């Protein structure tokens, strides 16, 4: 499966058949140059939510063979509420940040090194753009990696504060289909919160028997 297809159609993961074998292709894997693994699930049995959670934690990607469904943590958090805690309790205080004049190439190297899917562009101490893997992929396809990150960054995005509830952050991620939010106060960028922090802090008491 080509990078062009995934970027054009905003697809970040899919299963392809190669002969009699299934292969997982992810946008992250194509850009970072590595293969991703997945775990197949036979839907003949009954699966509890906590079991699915544990499997995603272990394998990252699950493929349900009967329904031909591929899911990951981003999909799981769409239907599960976060704990009643504030963003400031779990936020990442060291997200990848970049000035607007930095090249996509240089930011991509940082993303690869830290295995991160997002970078925040900062203008006058506050976020002014978010570079994600779709933006990176577009730059690669157009041969423009040496250009400014702002040419490929998302400029319209939600932000939260440390006092925002994690559940509010989760809902904003789902409504925008962007699973990464800068955390700010009125003066400066303070950090970020992503699907990772939400997944690690779901209200599992609501479904664990």
Image: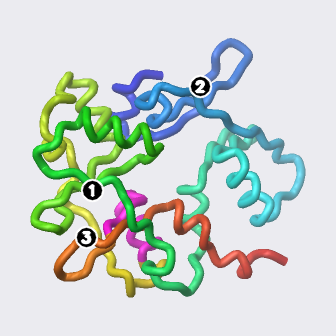
Q: Residue at x 19, y 42 (%)?
A: 152
| Quarter of the image where one finds residue 24 | top right
Compared with 49, 5 (above or below) is: above
- Which is nearer the N-term, disc 2 or disc 3? 2
Q: Is residue 173 magenta?
A: yes
Spatial CA distance of label 2 from label 3 is 40 Å
Q: Which mark is residue 81?
A: none
- Read off the residue under disc 2: 16
Q: Secondary structure at mark 1?
A: strand
Q: Residues within 10 Å of mark 3 (few under 14, many from 20)?
A: many
Lower position in the chain sequence, tag 1 or tag 3? 1
Label 1: which residue?
120
Which of the two marks, 1 or 2, is nearer to us in this view? 1
The colour mode here is rainbow
| Residue sitting at x 40%, y 32% | 6
Tell us which disc is closer to us: 2 or 3.
3
Q: Are marks 1 and 3 in contact (CB under 8 Å)?
A: yes
Q: Residue at x 14, y 47 (%)?
A: 150
Residue at which label 3 appears: 189
């Amino acid at each position: 499966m080509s990078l062009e297809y995934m970027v054009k159609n905003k697809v970040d993961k899919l299963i392809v058949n190669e002969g009699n074998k299934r292969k997982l292709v992810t946008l992250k894997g194509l850009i970072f140059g590595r293969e991703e693994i997945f775990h197949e699930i036979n839907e003949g049995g009954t699966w509890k939510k906590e079991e699915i959670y544990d499997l995603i934690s272990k394998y990252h990607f699950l493929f349900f063979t009967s329904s031909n469904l591929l899911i990951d943590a981003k999909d799981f958090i769409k239907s599960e509420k976060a704990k009643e805690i504030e963003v400031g309790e779990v936020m990442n205080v060291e997200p990848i940040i970049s000035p607007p004049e930095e090249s996509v190439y240089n930011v991509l190297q940082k993303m690869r090194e830290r295995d991160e899917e997002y970078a925040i562009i900062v203008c006058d101490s506050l976020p002014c753009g978010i570079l994600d893997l779709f933006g990176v992929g577009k730059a690669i396809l157009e041969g423009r990696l040496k250009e400014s990150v702002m040419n490929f960054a998302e400029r319209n995005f939600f932000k939260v504060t440390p006092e925002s509830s994690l559940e509010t952050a989760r809902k904003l991620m789902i409504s925008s289909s962007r699973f990464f939010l800068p955390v700010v106060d009125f003066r400066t960028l303070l950090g970020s919160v992503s699907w990772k922090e939400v997944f690690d802090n779901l209200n599992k008491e609501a479904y664990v028997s």
